[in-house]
Image (cartoon, rainbow, N blue to C red):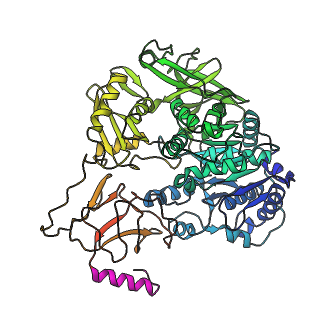
Amino acid sequence: MTFSDVFASWQREDTALHFDGDPEEKAITFAALSSRTADLATRFASLGLSRGDRIVLAMSDARQFILSLVAALRAGLVVVPAAPPSLTSRGDAFRDSSREICRVSGASLCLTGGFFTGFLADAGLSCPVETFESLTAAEPAGPVLPPDAGDLALIQFTSGSTGSPKGVVVRHGELLAHVRALSAALAVDPETDRGVSWLPFHHDMGLIGKIFVPLLTQTSTWYVPPLSFVRDPAGFLRIMSEIRGTISFAPNFAYGLLAAVAAKKPPTGLDLSAWRIAGCGAEPVSAATLRRFADAYADSGFRPGALRPCYGMAEAVLAVSVAPPADGPRTLVADARRLAEDRTVVPATGDDGVVLTSSGRPIDGTEIRILDPDGRPLEDGREGEITLSGEHLAHGYHEDPDETGRTWRDGRLHTGDLGFLSDGELFVTGRIKDLIIVNGRNHHPHTIEQQVEAVPGVRPGGAVAVSVPRGDSEAVRIVAEARSYPPPAGLAEEVAARVGEQFGLRVADVTVVRKGTVPKTSSGKKQRRLTAGLLESGRLVAVPDDPAPQPPAAQAPVAREPSPVPVIGSSYVVKAGDTITEIAFTAYGDARRHQELALHNKNVEGFNAARLRSGMEIDIPEPDYLPMPSGLGGLRGNVGRSFSIRPVGPAESRVRTADRKEGRQS
């Protein structure tokens, strides 16, 4: 049996998938989904696809993505979910990633939608690009042969938090068995449960947890665009309240963001009492963050027992372990020095303790074993590498035998993560490759980062701790995003002092940067090794403690050109008397087409032929461009992204304005 059989069995008219903000279709019942995807499955042949071909889905529209996903699986195609270009994508990096995913997967087609089509069509992909509309308009080609359990269903590309993205291969039998085990662990009941998700579809948590679980169980689920959550986190909670949502999952940072929203503006009119599973995974889980969230929404009916930390990875298809129902997340306060020196977990007796959060028990069909560096099993309370075995894990990377051999060996999946077991529950402590080893002691970067983010003035989720070689040992370097600009005076010194007091570490340096500077993956994971490389190359620079002074009014105007390759964190300062400044971005990767962009930013005023006021700054956090739609709609929230900036004269500005009125782009 495969998911194709599940899709064909759907008959429910009383449960549906709902698409928040979709102008065309607000909901599709499971019965309708079955008939529509059966029809769409017959149309892929007219686009040149046959059973076993790879199809890349790069879509931001939830309705189009799910219809395409289900239809492609029913047609026996291999689905390759990919991140669509977004308003936060880095242009060159996104094009490179798209080309690599299509090449490595051997894709025969990339299916997308909206204005993304033009951008991807110009990206030099190794396969044709078509739209969802072209699929619906294609001619049906007769019945399709459903896939077998041993056929390939998905190629899930990892997020690249620790290296280049790799394609995890998932067969139909493994996919169905895994989703069944996860649904059982969560006790999903379509009669009473209602899911809400803002997670991106190309990420394993959003794809497996919030698409395939509802598809298997026919559970009503509401989909919120990821950017909507980023722009208005409280909007997600309003939907949870209005529909009495019961299940939702998110990374740790999202709970911190929602807690911060409540701190600024206490919630009113929310009823979260129906929320029974607030899953937390995809990155290290902070008990303090979850506690702040629970406290912030206690008056809205949220119960701490709904918080369910979990652990998983694409190589396991998704879930490895899920915390059982309880009064709240289980935590241990371990002696930090013992954990660092001999990897033994013992209760802390003084102030030198680190709080560790349980990620729960393994789901059915998964066995967890902790191994030492020599491959020997470790008893409870001893930290080592987390390894897995089970009937519904993935079994390799697509066309990468070397990396497959390193990850799947001796009959086990070696995760590269560190952790320990205690009373049958898994505690994840970090990644082997991220360990900071100073004078023979091991330090996990996320525990250091949690202390840094507790310093007033540091943005939550905006700290990164990395190690760099220094003599015979390593030194700790820290990057901290400031909550606001200018940062508080002495912030770097306070961060260094906090780390020294808590961990006995000497910090080599602290680099305070603007918010949004720390490199992260498309799923929000910190890219520590990339950060370390940027620090070493000098491309990550600190912001000053005070803004640049304005020149005297009598001083002659001086227009400072930006660096040809701006360093991360640099700024272009508009001087008194400067002429019009054009903020240009590259549309669809074509450097010849520019549009002026009005940024809704306290640091930038003016648009078109307006003069910018003196002393204003424009952030340049990254030295490349953004793919953008032809219009200005939907550009809010893109402050601090990568734009080329140059002064232009009034005459040139008038020419550009006239060109736009005539329908041309210069």
Horizontally, residue 44 falls left or right of residue 455, namely right
Quadrant placement of the N terminus: top right
Instruction: Tell whether 274 sits left or right of 264.
Output: right
Q: Nearer the viewer, residue 494 or 197?
A: 494
Pinpoint residue 356: horizontal percent, then vertical percent: 52, 24
Among all residues in the image, which is located at the extreme bottom? Answer: 662
Q: Residue at x 77, y 59 (%)?
A: 28
Q: Position of residue 530 (x, y in %)?
A: 39, 44
Q: Which residue is at the front of the view, 480 or 589?
A: 480
- Quadrant of the image containing the C terminus: bottom left
**What residue range appears in magenta?**
650-666
Quarter assignment of residue 575: bottom left
Q: Is 301 on the left-hand or right-hand side of 591? A: right
Is there any visible trace of residue 198 in the rendered image? no
Is 126 drawn above or below residue 498 in the view shown?
below
**Secondary structure mostly seen in the magenta stretch:** helix
Which quadrant of the figure has residue 448? top left
